Amino acid sequence: GEVERITPLCFSDPGLSQANMKLVVVGVDMTRPENLHPIAEQEDSECITSQIIPLKGLYAELTAMQAQAGVEVDARLLHLALGLDMGSL
């Protein structure tokens, strides 16, 4: 993919820790076969599942997944999905 945007430095837990990050937006060509079935490169302690979900309906899909036992969604992803959902009002 190609980097499309990098945000300024932001803090994950302002006032609680010095944890910080930059968000990088990468464009992915979904017509390429190697991008159709992504494989997570995870550490031994991680259990990450990659799924391709359209942006439209992302919030509904993520919250439905959360309702299933054992499915956890990163807060930043859920916040993005909620923002997209609210933007369509």
Image (cartoon, rainbow, N blue to C red):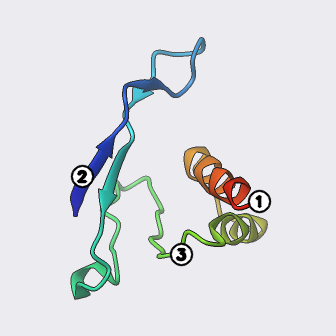
Question: What residue is pinned by disc 3?
Answer: 54
- Image coordinates of residue 39 in percent, x first then y, are 33, 73
Q: Residue at x 52, y 16 (%)?
A: 17
Give the percent coordinates (x, y) of residue 47. Answer: 48, 62
Relative to 82, 20 lies left or right: left
What label does residue 89 carry, if any? 1
What percent of the width, then of the height, locates residue 48?
Answer: 46, 63
Q: Quadrant of the N terminus?
A: bottom left
| Amino acid at the residue labelled 2 | Val
Is 6 left or right of 12, judged from the image as shown? left
Rounded to the nearest angstrom, the CA distance separating label 1 from label 3 is: 18 Å
Judging from the image, what secondary structure is the residue with disc 2 in?
A: strand
User: What is the quadrant of residue 46 in the picture?
Assistant: bottom left
Residue appearing at x 47%, y 76% in the figure: 52
Q: Nearer the viewer, mark 2 or mark 1?
A: 1
Q: Quadrant location of residue 37?
A: bottom left
Q: Secondary structure at mark 3?
A: loop
Residue count near mark 2 (Cα–Cα under 10 Å), binned few <14, some 14–19, many ≥20: few
Where is the C terminus found, in terms of image quarters?
bottom right
Name the residue that disc number 2 marks.
3
Residue 75, compared with residue 7, is above or below; it is below
Disc 1 is placed on an element classified as: loop
Give the residue type that dot 3 points to. Answer: Pro
> How much space separates mark 3 and mark 2, taking CA atoms?
19 Å
First in residue order: circle 2 vs circle 1? 2
Front residue of 36/18: it is 36
Q: Is residue 43 left or right of residue 75?
A: left
> Is tag 1's residue or tag 3's residue first in the polypeptide sequence?
3
Label 2, label 1: how far apart the Cα atoms are: 29 Å
